[in-house]
Amino acid sequence: MVIPAPGLQPLVAEYDNMLRCIRCAACLTSCPTYVVTHKEEEGPRGRIAIMRAIVEGHLDVTPDAVEHLDNCLLCEACTNVCPAGVQMESMGVAFRDSLAAAKQSGGRSPGVRFAFAWLFGDLAHFRLLGWLIWMYQRSGVQWLARRSGVLRWLGLQAMESLLPKVPGPARFVVPKGQTVGRGPPVHVFAGCIMSTAFAATTAATARLVAAFGCQAELTRGQVCCGALQFHAGDTERARALAKQNLAAFGDGSAPIVVNAAGCGAMLKHYGHLLPQEPRAAAMAARVRDVSEFLAGRQPTNPPRPVPLTVTLQDACHLLHAQRIAAAPRTLLRSIPGLELREMAEAEICCGSGAMYNVSHPGMSAELRQRKCANIAASGSQVVVTGNPGCLVQLQGGLPKDIRVRHIVDVLADAYLEDDRRA
Amino acid sequence: MNSGVVAELKRIVAPDYVHDAPSEIIAYSYDGTFQQRRPDLAVSPASTAEVAAVMRLAGRENIPIIARGASSGLAGGTIPESGGIVLNLARMDRILEIDTHNVCVVAEAGVVTLQLQQAVERVGLLYPPDPASSRQSTIGGNVATNAGGPRCLKYGATRDYVIGLTVVLASGEVLRLGGKFTKSATGYQLMQLITGSEGTLGIVTEAILRLVPLPRARVTAVAIFGQLSLASQAVSKIMGSGILPATLELMDATTINVVEDYLAAGLPRHAQALLLMEQDGGDESVARAEVERMADICRGLGAEQVQVATSAAERDTLWQARRAVSAALGRLRPNKLGEDIVVPKSEIPAMIAAVAEIAARYGLPIPVFGHAGDGNLHPNILFDLRDPAEVQRVEHAARDIFRAALRLGGTLSGEHGVGTLKREFLEEAQGPLAVSLARAIKQVFDPRGLLNPGKVFPTGRGTEGFLADLPTLAGWTPG
C-alpha cells in the first residue's frame, strides 16, 4: 500500500476521470505525439495509464514519466474522440499543478512565476513587452543578435525565431470602452498577444462585428484570459485573471467575441475554473469565437470577391476544445471567388500548443513540418487559422509562396469597406 | 532483464525504440480490457529483419515475446502475462503497394485498418473487414485475431481476405506464405492456420490482402422496436427471407442511451432495441428494394418506426454511433467484460432471452449489441473491479453466457479471439480432441513456448475463479 505524495493531490482528484478510460485506444490516431512516434507512452491512453499508476502507487514520479506526460500538447484531440468521456485537459493540468506544487522539473521557478504574474496581470504591462520587442526588431538589435550568434550562445535561437513581427506600439489595441458600429452590444475580447502583436487583426475583429450589424465594444478593464498560466499548472494565477475579466465583462447578456481560439476555450472554461463563483459560468456561456459569432449572423452588406485558394488549419482550441468545425468553413465559403480546399490531417495539431514550440522545440518542429507538407499538398495560396499560436508556428515553416492569415483578416478583405490594412 | 540483452536490443532497434523506463513499462502493460501486467520491456521494430533479430535474441535468452499493434484487443491477447518483451509493431505502418490489376494490397502489420480502407477506397476498391475499432486497430492485430465487423455478414472476416503473409517464426526464420493469387489447393494452408492464432504461432509482419470492387450504392435504414425480443425475431426473419444484407446490427436500450450521451446522434432514447440495416451493391435501386423489404419485415413484426437514411452524412452518423458503443459503455461503470459469443442465426432470440435471464439472476447490467445477422453478439457485463463480491458474480454470469451459447450450438468468440478471457472454456467449446491437436501444432511452431505464452489454451486451473485469476495491477486505490 503506497499513499501518494502530498503534492499529488490535484492528480488524485482526477482519479475518477482516469477510471473512465476503458483503454479502447480510439484516441491513439488522434494524438499528434503518437502519430509521429508510434509509442504508447506518447499517446493519450499511455499517459492516462501512467498517471493512474502514479496515483495508485505503482509508479513513482520518475523523470521518464514527467517527460512523457509533459510532451502532451493539451490539444484536446483525444478528449474529442473519446467515447468514454475522459477529459484530458483537466488531467494534464492536474499533473502540471502537482509538479509545480512538488517543485520538480517542469514546474516554473518563483522568479519566472513572478514575471508571469506581472506581465499578464495587466494588459499595460504586456504592451510594454510588445514595445520592447518592437524596439528590438526595429532598432537593428535583432539583426545584430541574429548575426552575432549570441542567441545560439544563450540557447534562445528557437524561441527568438518564434517572435511575431510586432507592429508599432501606436497601433496596439488599448481597450478602454471605445465602440464601433450600431446594433445590439457585443464585447470584443482583445487578449494580450492579439492586442499587441496582432493588433490589426483585433481592430478588424471589432469592425467585422460592426459589419455584421452589432455595436462592438473594446471593453475597459479586461486582462489576459489566463490560458498560458492554466496550462503551465499555475491555476491560482489563472483564477486571479478570470476574476478580473469577470469584473470587466459584468453580469450583462451581451456576447463576448474572441478572435483567439485558445483564449475562447479558456474563457468558456471559467465556470469550471471558478466553481465557487456563480457568475463565472454565466459569463462563460456568453463567450463566442469570432467565427462562431459571425456565422450565426447576416452581414449588412454582401461580401466582395476575394480570389484566393485557401485551406483551413483547424486550431485545436477551436476544433477540439470548443468543437467548432463548420462555422469557419461556412464563413469562408460565403466569400465569392474564394476556393476552400481541405488538407489532410487538418485535425492534427501544428505543434504550437500553449508555448509548446518553446518548451518542446524538437517535437514541435516535427509536427510543423508534417503540417506544412499537408498544407502544401492541398495546393492552396493561403492557410487560414483562428489562433495566434498557429499563426506564429506556421509562419516559420511554410514555403515562400504560401501565406498564413487569420480568418478575420480574410473576412476583412471581403466585408470591410476600404480596409486595406498594412 | 540483464543489461547485455537491453544493449543488444538497442543495437537492433535503436535506443529510442527500446522502452524500458518505469513509466514506459506501464504503457505496454494493458490492452482493451481491464487486464494489466508489466512486461520486462517493450521494443518498437521498424522492419521484418528487426523483428527476426529480436526473435533470435529472445530465443537465445529464453524470453517470451508478445506481439501487439494498437493493443485494442478485447480478450487479453496482448497482455504480457508472464513478463518478457512486448513487440510493438505500430511503427511498421507502410502500405507497400495497392495492386489494382491483382486487386490486392500489400501492407505492413502496423498499418491502421481505417487508413488502409481509405487508401484502397480512393482507387475504387474495398477492404471489407471492418472491426468497430478500425480507427485504431492494425492489420497485424486483425490477422492475429481474425477480426470481423458488421460487414462480415455479407463479406466474411479477415481470414477470407488474407492471401499472403510474412511471418517471423519462433526460430527467428522468416516464413513467406501465399502471394498475389486467390486460389490454392497446394498443400496445407498454413496461412489460414496462422490467421487467428493470436501471436502464438508466429509474428505476422506483413500481409497481402484481397480486395473487392467498392460498391457504388449503399442504402442504410434504422428500425426502432418497443421490445428487444421483436428485434431479435426480425433478425431471424430477415436472414431467412432470401436477402443477404451487407450489415444487420442490433443495439439494445442501454447501448442506445449510452451512445446518445456521447454523440447526440438523434437515436430514440425510449426505444428498447434498434436494428441498423444496410445493403450495398452496384445498383442503387436493387439495394434500396432489398432495404425496403427488410423494413417491411420489421414493420410486420411491430417496429415502431423504420427510417431509411437520406444522406451520406446521416448514414455516417449512424455508423459512428454504432462503432462507439463498446467504448461508450465505459461511461456507466469503471469496468466491462465484453463478450463475443456466436450462435446459429435461428437461436438469436433464445440467446438474447438467456442473457436477460442471466443479468437478472446475478443483478448485473448486461447490455447487448452486435452483429445480429451472423449470430455474433456482444453482451457486455458492466462492473467495478474493486468490488470482489461483484467480480465473483461477473465471473458466474460470464460462465453462464458462454455455456448458454454452447448449448444453443454456438461458440465462445466470433471475432475478438480467446486470449486469456475465454481460455478456460476452450475444451468445452471445441472438445478435448481438437484442443490436443492444437497443442501439438503449437509445439511444432514454438517448442519452447516463447510466443505469447499462456494465451488461447486452458491453463489447467479450471473455470472456477478464472476472472479473479486474470492479471491486474492491484494495490492502493483512492476513494
Image: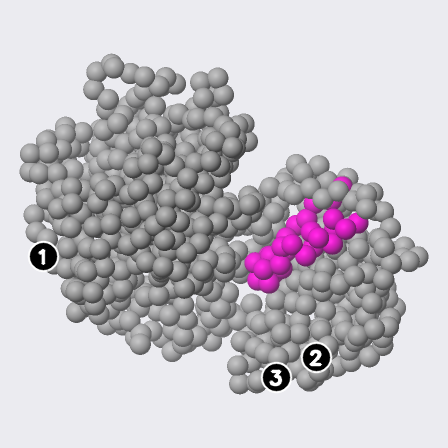
> Are callouts 2 and 1 both on one chain?
no
Residue A328 in magenta? yes
Query: At 14% across and 50% down in the image, what residue appears?
Result: B403
Discs 2 and 3 lie in a common subunit: yes
Other-residue count near label 1 (Cα within 10 Å), few / some / many at <14 / 14–19 / ≥20: few
Q: Report which residue position mark 1 lands on.
A: B464
Q: Residue at x 37, y 70 (%)?
A: A16
Whether residue A341 is situated above or below residue A298 in the rendered picture: above
Towards the viewer: B353 or A413: B353
Counting from the top left corner in percent of width and height, residue A410 is at 79, 53
For label 2, the residue is A253
Under mark 1, the amino acid is Glu
Tell me the crowding category of disc 2: few under 14, some 14 to 19, or many 20 or more residues within 10 angstroms, Cα based.
Answer: few
Q: Describe the element under mark 3 as helix, strand or loop.
A: helix
Q: CA distance from mark 2 to mark 3?
A: 12 Å
Classify residue B150 as left or right of residue A283: left
- The number of numbered badges drawn on the structure is 3
Res A317 → quadrant? bottom right
Residue B34 in which image quadrant: bottom left
Quarter holding the N terminus of chain A?
bottom left
Q: Chain of mark 3?
A: A
Magenta span includes B387 = no
Give the amino acid type for the residue marked by disc 3 in the picture.
Arg
> What chain letter is assigned to the residue under label 2?
A
